[in-house]
Amino acid sequence: MYNIVKFEEAHSVKEAIQLLQENPKARLIAGGSDVLIKIHGGKIEDTELISIHGIPELSGISYEADGTIVIGSGTTFSKIANHPLIIENVPVLGEAVEMVGGPQIRNIGTIGGNICNGVTSADSASTLFALDASLRIQGASGIRIIAIEDFYQGPGKVDLQHDEILTAVLLSQENYRGFGGHYIKYAMRNAMDIATLGCAVVCKIKDKMLVEDFRLAFGVAAPTPVRCRKAEKLAIGKTFSEELLDEISKAAVAEVNPRTSWRASKEFRLQLVEELSKRAFKEAFIKAGGEL
Amino acid sequence: MTTKKITFKVNNKEVTVEVDVRESLLEVLRNELNLKGVKKGCSVGECGACTVLVNGEAIDSCIYLAIWADGKEIKTIEGEETEGKLSKLQQAFVDEGAVQCGFCTPGFVMSARALLDSGKKLSREDIKKGMSGNMCRCTGYQNIIKAVEKSIED
């Protein structure tokens, strides 16, 4: 039996917002794979919960008229990985969320929960950073849209007011159309593990060699997921080569700020940043139509 | 504490139970419905011993609130056999010696069931990936994977 002192069930976003307003100490629960484990471990006590589990309007993936892909925040990792819109347009995101935990966790864990936890190791986060995703947030006073990079404010801290709910992740056409991408999760096991380091690259290649656009993002390389803007600038407009890989990977090392944890030392993580940025770029380059 | 009356199907049988909102599906299945084949292992969604199917998808019932089962279809290991006869999948576990202490077996069988019911053509890698949320501390993985492979052969 979980130590829950109050429990409310919302059936719509509107109702959830209202319940949040009425219960200033309550927190949202969607899939439960983080919240319930925190309760079990005693990390949160006397918990008041508002369940948004299975609210239909939060689940699913759709296309908007302008080509924006809208992923409901309550969509599970499995649904994302197997959705035709994702497989066809943004396969890198499907591949990234397939790395989360194991099948049982991917069947309940939601992309919204992954983001709102604010952890740097979230498998979806670095790819969403590279894709310049925006987030749709609904509160009592209306809807606002925020860039994912601005949403993360620090470890476990995100730009979400108590009475607000992340309702959707938005991927605009100019950020995925024509791109190839690759995500590498470095962990001790192939499943049921948290990333020691996560590296996401998306890029656009012209004439099989020219780097037209390039985005490099990491998880666990800083207190929040990060983009490496300086390294990105170095690559754009250049011809793909082994030298370019060396150049951008060294630039990335200078931009990140990992820490030593029980999982790995700072030094090891820096080495991973250098090596994985090369490997991920190479794979993304090929997926974007590049030829070595 | 609040309770809620929920109705759901377990192994094709409709049940209505009054559950405490704090209870996990695992607790309700074991303690209220006496489905003791659903094992309680780690309690934090890591070992897969409590795996059941909710609307065909494998989930860890220890980290799934019972009230969420309202209106859903649940399948546990008890629903795998038909009239006392083991399913082809269960028989393959027996034949391949995929059971040692047996504690992880119901969870493994349910994860395999979800894989088989997906209708996808499964490679050995697909099977390994599909079963990666289950742990066997006797480390009988080879035979478990062989059993699933055997159950797909005709």
Image: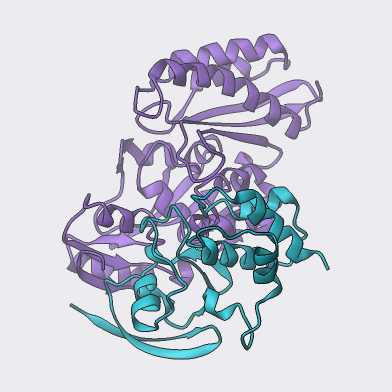
Chain colours: A purple, B cyan
Up/down of A167 relative to B88, above or below: above
The residue positioned 57% from the left and 28% from the top of the image is: A215
- Comparing A230 with B75, the one in front is B75
* x and y, in percent, of residue A31 in the image: 41, 61
The residue positioned 63% from the left and 88% from the top of the image is: B83
Up/down of B54 relative to B34, above or below: above
> Is residue A252 shown left or right of residue A120?
right
Where, by quadrant of the figure, is residue B45 drawn? Answer: bottom left
Can I make out residue A138 in this image?
yes
Can I make out residue B120 in this image?
no
The residue positioned 47% from the left and 53% from the top of the image is: A111
* x and y, in percent, of residue A269 in the image: 45, 21
* x and y, in percent, of residue A272 in the image: 52, 21
Count up the numbered dots.
0
Up/down of A221 relative to B76, above or below: above
- Comparing A92 with B17, the one in front is B17
The residue positioned 54% from the left and 74% from the top of the image is: B77
> Is residue A251 shown left or right of residue A67?
left
- Comparing B104 with B79, the one in front is B104
- Comparing A225 with A276, the one in front is A276
Where, by quadrant of the figure, is residue B58 drawn? Answer: bottom right
Up/down of B42 relative to B22, above or below: above
* x and y, in percent, of residue A108 in the image: 47, 61
Quadrant of the drawing holding the C terminus of chain B:
bottom right
> Is residue B81 shown left or right of residue A198?
right
Quadrant of the drawing holding the N terminus of chain B:
bottom left
